[in-house]
Amino acid sequence: MLATRRFDIKYVKGIGPARAKLLASELGIESVYDLLHHYPTSYIDRSTIRPVRSLFDAVAAEVAYVLVRGRFVSFNTLGEGAKMRLIGLFSDGTSTLEVVWFQGWREVRKRLRTGEEYLLFGKPGIFNNTLQMVHPEVESPDSAGAAETVRAVYPLTEKLRQRNITSRTLHAAVMQVLGNLKAPLKETLPLSTLAANGLMGIDAAIRTIHNPTDADSLSRARLRLKFEELFYIQTDMLRRSRKRKADTQGYIMPHIGRWFNDFYSQCLPFELTGAQKRVIKEIRADMAGGRQMNRLVQGDVGSGKTLVALMAMLLALDNGYQACLMAPTEILAGQHYETIRSIVAKIGLNVKLLTGSTKVAERRVIDSQLRDGTLHILVGTHAVLEDKVEFAHLGLAVIDEQHRFGVAQRARLWAKSAVPPHVLVMTATPIPRTLAMTVYGDLDVSVIDELPPGRKPVATVLRYDDQRAKVRAAVRRQLDAGHQVYIVYPLVKENEKLDLRSVEEGFAQAEQTYAPYKVALVHGQLKPAIKDEQMERFVSGEAAILVATTVIEVGVNVPNATTMIIENAERFGLSQLHQLRGRVGRGADRSYCVLMSKHQIGADTRKRLEIMTSTTDGFVIAEADMQMRGPGDIEGTAQSGLPFDLKIANLAHDGQIIQLARRAAEVLLDDDPDLSLPANHGFANALADMLSRTTDWSRIS
C-alpha cells in the first residue's frame, strides 16, 4: 500500500496533468493511494429510472441523485463572454427539464444531439419554478457505463463538476488502477487484529467499497475501513498516553495543608456534590502520583467546575507551588477572577488578573510577585503565555474551554516551569463519550454530572411569533418580582435579505415595551469599554434587561437573572442554545428559557427545538447535536485535532466501532507496547507513515 502513495495520479489513464492538478487542489488527491481512499459516500441503483414529472417530489425529499431517460428537444446559449452557458430542454414525455452547463459547454454541444435518447444522472433542483439539473452525467442507454446497476457516488466540488470531472470519471480511474495491480494490496492491520475482530482483508475491502456486488459485502467492507481509521487513531492516542504516563515526570504534591483546609472550613459556599468530591479525589491522586496530570473535567453549565479547579489550585499552593487559570476571553477571565477573589477573601490568598487590558503599573506588580512567589494564583487570557510572564514555581495550569486555544499556544505553558506543570482542562461544552474517546483519547476524563444543591432545572418552552403577547406578559411578571431578563438576538443590525430580528431593533423595542425598567445593550461590534460598561449595568442590577447577541454565551454569572428569551431560536445550533440557556438558573429561583421561532420551520429544525424543551442534560443534547450535525460542527472538535482526517468513519454514528477499535488497540499494545514484533511491522509502518504527514502535538493536550 505504501508504494501507491508515491504513484502520481496524473499517470492514471483519463486523468493527465491538468485533471491531476485540479484533483489535488480540490480534493487533496495526489497519488493512487489518495484515489483509492477517496471513498464513495453513497450508491445509486441505476436500474431505477424516474419519470421527469416525479422530480419535484425528489427535490422536496432532498434526493441527492436521480436517473432519467429521454431526449433533448432543443439547445440554447444564454449570457455573454465568461458568463455564457448552455441550456438544453430535456423531455421524457411526462414533463420537461432544463439541463445547464456553465463550463465546457462547447464540447458538450458538439457531443449531444436533439432527438437522440440519453440517460441523465445528476442532482435535481428547482430554479425560477422550473426543474433543473446542472452539469449531469450524460450517456447513451447502450453504453458500457449505462449497463451498471449500481454506481458509486463520490464526494465532488462544484468546480470539478464544471470541469466535467464526475463520479463516473473517478470510478473509471479507480477501476483501472485496481485492474492494473499485479498483486493484492498489502495488508495494513496486524493479522491477529483482523482475526480477532472478524474483519475483511484490505484488498477485498477496497475493491468492494468502490464496486459492491451485494449489501452484505459492502457492509463488511465499510466496517473494515472504518475500523482501520479508528484503530490508527486509538492506537496512536493510547500509545502516547501510556508513554506520557511512563516517561513524563510531574511535581509530587502529596500534602493537604493550610490553604485547602482553611478554604474548606471557612469559605466553601455550599456542600460539595458527590460528583465534585469524586473528581477532586481523582485530581488529588494524579497530583500526588509523581507523573504529570493531564485531566479533562467535563461538566454541564453550573455544575461547579470552577470550584473543583480552585480546590486543585489550593492543593498546589499547599505543596509550595503557584497556579494559573487561563480563559479564552477577557469577560470569562474576569468572571473567574471575581469568583475566585471573592470566595477566598477570608483566607488572604493573593489572586491577580492578567489580560491585554491590564494597566502597566498593575502589570509590574504582577510580574514582580510572580517571580518572587508571593502571587499564588494568576487568572488570565492569552496574555499569560507571553514570554515575559515568569513564575517562580508553576505547579498547576488550569485551562478553561481549551478548544479556543491553539495547540501551539497551550504548549507554551510547558516553558513556564522546569518540570511540566500538572494540566487540568475544563469544558462546559459536553462532549459525547465516543467523541471524547477519540478527540481527547490521551487525557484522563472526569465528569461532574450533578448540579449543586438549590439549583433547579431551567423550564424551557417553544413559543411562536403569534404568542408574543403572552411571552411579554410573563417577562413583565418576572421583572415586577425583582428578577432580571436576557433577550438574545442572532443579528446586530437589520438585514433585508434575512428575515431575522436584530439586536438594535430589539433594544429599542424592549425599552418601549418594558418601561420604566432599564435596558442594557451588548454585542460584538461595541467598543470593549462600552461593552464592559453595559455588562456591568446588568451585573450590578442597575439594568433589569440585557439585550444581546451570543457574546453572552459564556462569562456572565447573574444569579438574579431568571428568564432567557432567544429570538429566532431556529437559527441557533443545539449546543449554542444550551450554552445560552445556562446563563439562567444560576440562583435558587425558578428560571425559564423561551425559544421564540417562526411557525414555518423545517423538520430538522423543529426536532432540534423540541430536544431543547425535552431535556436540560447537556450530554444528551451534545449526543443529539452530534447525530444531527456531525462531529466537525460541534464547537471545538474541528480545532481539537485528530491525528489525521477521517475518510469514511463518522464519530457521530460509529460509536460501537470506536469502542471496538479502542479495545483492539489495548490488546495490541498490552502484547507489544512499542509495536516492535515482526508480526506488527506492517501496521507500525503504516501508522508511522500516517503520522509523518501531521504535526506531533503529543507533548501537550
Image: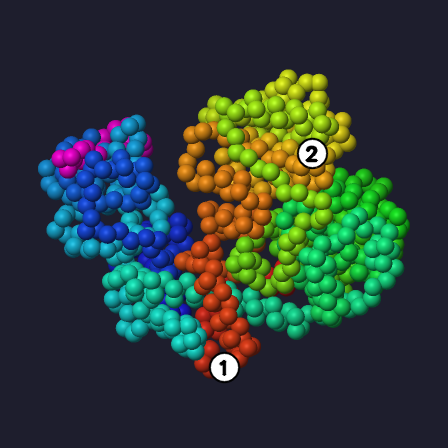
The image position of residue 562, as x and y in percent, is 67, 34
Is residue 534 something one can see in this rendering? no
**Earlier sequence position, callout 2 versus callout 1:** 2
173 shown above or below 201: above
The residue at which mark 2 appears reads as: 561
Q: Is residue 69 left or right of residue 698?
A: left
Q: Is residue 47 left or right of residue 305?
A: left
Of residues 228 and 596, the one drawn nearer to the viewer in this rendering: 596
Which residue is located at x 55 percent, y 58 percent?
Answer: 433
49, 359: nearer the viewer: 49
- The residue range painted magenta reads 77-97
Quadrant of res 455: top right
**Percent x, y for residue 194?**
40, 74
Which of the two marks, 2 or 1, is nearer to us in this view? 2
Q: For the residue labelled by badge 1, is the local secondary structure a helix, a strand or a loop?
A: loop
**Residue lying farthest left?**
115
How many numbered badges does the structure rendering display?
Answer: 2
Label number found at residue 677:
1
In the rendered structure, which amino acid carries the disc numbered 1?
Leu
| Mark 2 Cα-neighbour bin, 10 Å: few <14, some 14–19, many ≥20 | many
State how far apart marks 2 and 1 are (Cα): 62 Å
Residue type highlighted by circle 2:
Ala
Foreground of the two, 677 or 536: 536
* Label 1, residues with CA under 10 Å away: few <14, some 14-19, many ≥20: few
The quarter of the rendered structure image containing the N terminus is: bottom left
User: What percent of the width, then of the height, locates residue 616?
Assistant: 58, 44
Task: Give the residue displayed 82% in from the left and 41% down from the top.
Answer: 360
Instruction: State left or right for residue 453 relative to residue 74.
Output: right
Percent coordinates x, y for residue 316 in the rendering:
80, 60
In which quadrant will I find the C terminus? Answer: bottom right
